[in-house]
Image (cartoon, coloured by chain):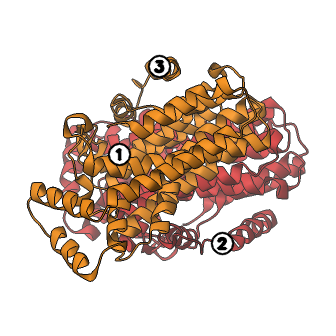
Chain colours: A orange, B red
Amino acid sequence: MDSIQRLGSLVQAQFDAYNWKIEPKRLYAPIDYFLQLGGKRMRPILTLMSTELFNAKAEIAIPAAMSVELFHNFSLIHDDIMDDAPLRRKKKTVHEKWDLNTAILSGDVLLIKAYQELAKQNTKHVPELLHLFNQTSVEVCEGQQMDMDFEKRKNVSISEYIEMIRLKTSVLLGCALEMGAIISDANEKDRKKIYSFGQDLGIAFQIKDDLLDLYGDPEKFGKQIGGDVIANKKTLLYLLAKENATPEVLKKIAKLEKIKSKKVKVREFQLLFMQLNVPKMAQTYMDQYAANAMYALESIQVKQENKTALIELSAYLMQREN
Amino acid sequence: MDSIQRLGSLVQAQFDAYNWKIEPKRLYAPIDYFLQLGGKRMRPILTLMSTELFNAKAEIAIPAAMSVELFHNFSLIHDDIMDDAPLRRKKKTVHEKWDLNTAILSGDVLLIKAYQELAKQNTKHVPELLHLFNQTSVEVCEGQQMDMDFEKRKNVSISEYIEMIRLKTSVLLGCALEMGAIISDANEKDRKKIYSFGQDLGIAFQIKDDLLDLYGDPEKFGKQIGGDVIANKKTLLYLLAKENATPEVLKKIAKLEKIKSKKVKVREFQLLFMQLNVPKMAQTYMDQYAANAMYALESIQVKQENKTALIELSAYLMQREN
């Protein structure tokens, strides 16, 4: 796990070096606040790991790494508005701490700042990086739209759900990794492979999120357990349950959805999904995507030792408890 | 005025060629709707005029021209939310016709689409275009923030106001023009000059807007006359009035601000500002910025005939009645 810490420190040093104490204060203070809430910084670390994978120095990819992380934070600020979320990492969201307009405009400028970071890369790589970043950013917005559309729909298929999380979450991991490959002048084939690795890892990562949300250890998870079922969200667990439910079980699900007590509701869903073997099925989905990711990584033609960091990071993400 | 029509048609053809009938519908339909509301398309026309000014074919700058126009429309969609505006060009704004979340996310993806257009330019120009576009976009957000900050402040100086409109409106005109210069490989000096031309023209343009808002011909203006004073906005006219007011006149202004009848309020402010010679003073400001713009244009070392289109467009913008 040395690489995670070493590259994480590189990323943190960049965050520390930012100066957001600039005018207009009301535009930049919320960005400063939000970035200080922290997070795993998984995306920029992936960019730097990918750069090292292809035998270049991590340092040359720092602007691209930061652009992905700034983009991610922009999307969180705006998603929090759309989801009407009061808290993010146990602290107030931007629209709660300030107001709606502040959250919109600070988010906008943060998105532009992501592009500004990208533009700091070596000129010869900028057009390709920009193309990838644009494509990815559009897809993330499409994923967010699908997520919101699903809330209003009665039936969502598992393949639609996987496509939604692919767009909303996974393509950005693929992008983070491919950026490192572009910057270290990897060949086209390897670029596509590392992108695939990230995309499949991202889907597995999101399924892990769905699992942790309902079955995580409350001591370690850091968030309320069962937030998804409390909000009647159509997660993979929920869709698997519905797909494997008899008419009687469907009725039971409909009944559970109306339970007022959060504690009871969560407990009942935990039990029902267990009876339906849902966690096991979700785990199988997750393992399959994680295996696909590993397969893509294995097929990349670089020294085996270069892959250690990414293999370890993947294992950590699949075994994490928060 | 041939150039305006000819280049305007080029821009319109691009808009007609877009296909926004794509999935997710709820993300793209609002963009399709908003872009069809029209507008002067002044910004993309400026990019194309600047490209011709420096002896290149307008066609090669179409992606950059579109990127500026898409950015402008993104900023309008989000500004309409922040200003709580129900109408834009006599039609419902996006957040009114759909909802808040739709307006946020459609705006976000439109901003990214602007970058996607930019990335279509010749690779050799992309890094410089991106740098300019980023810088400008950040400034536009800063201008919007200043505008919102001013609403809550009691005192705003005229120079602060000019700086706000420079950021919120003018830098994008400068950017539109400089992009044309970059694409036609103009030299650094001329690039800066055409940017200055656009920036000063933009300030003059905004002052014209302030004047038209209160003194435009209701038949020709197309919007309600006096919208700014009805909303007690701190326009140049208002700030000039306050700066030149005796204590008694200041009291009168405070009184007028509280008038409930829109019609009476507008009439009273029209009269008071006339008595204080405000329209004349604002006109002097406008003429000064327009003259600075012309001076910058004159100093550019290209054939005089190349400048005709921009000179005519400037004259049109200063004399327009809507």
Q: Chain of mark 1?
A: A
Kindly indicate the quadrant of the structure image that contains residue B250. Answer: top left
- Nearest to viewer (mark 3 / mark 2): 3
- Nearest to viewer (mark 1 / mark 3): 3
**Residue B38: x and y, percent?**
59, 70
Tag 3 residue: A5
Q: What amino acid is found at the position of numbered circle 2 in the picture?
A: Asn
**Residue B122: x and y, percent?**
82, 46
Q: Chain of mark 3?
A: A
User: Do labels 1 and 3 touch, CB within 8 Å?
Assistant: no
User: Which numbered tag is attached to residue B165?
Assistant: none
User: Do labels 3 and 2 touch, CB within 8 Å?
Assistant: no
Q: What amino acid is found at the position of numbered circle 1 in the picture?
A: Ala
B228 or A232, nearer to the observer? A232
Q: Is residue B61 above or below residue A45?
A: below
**Residue A238: x and y, percent?**
32, 64
B159 or B137, nearer to the observer? B137
Q: CA distance from mark 3 to mark 2?
A: 46 Å
Q: Is residue A299 left or right of residue A313?
A: right
Mark 1 and mark 3, same subunit?
A: yes
Mark 1 and mark 2, same subunit?
A: no
Q: CA distance from mark 1 to mark 3?
A: 31 Å
- Sort mark 2 into few (<14), some (14-19) or many (20+) by Cα contacts within 10 Å: few
Q: Is residue B12 above or below residue B199?
A: below
A17 or A24, nearer to the observer? A17
- Sort mark 1 into few (<14), some (14-19) or many (20+) by Cα contacts within 10 Å: many
**Residue A6: x and y, percent?**
51, 17
Tag 2 residue: B19
Mark 3 and mark 2, same subunit?
A: no
Quarter holding the C terminus of chain A is top left
Residue B287 visible at all: no
User: Which numbered tag is attached to residue A103?
Assistant: 1
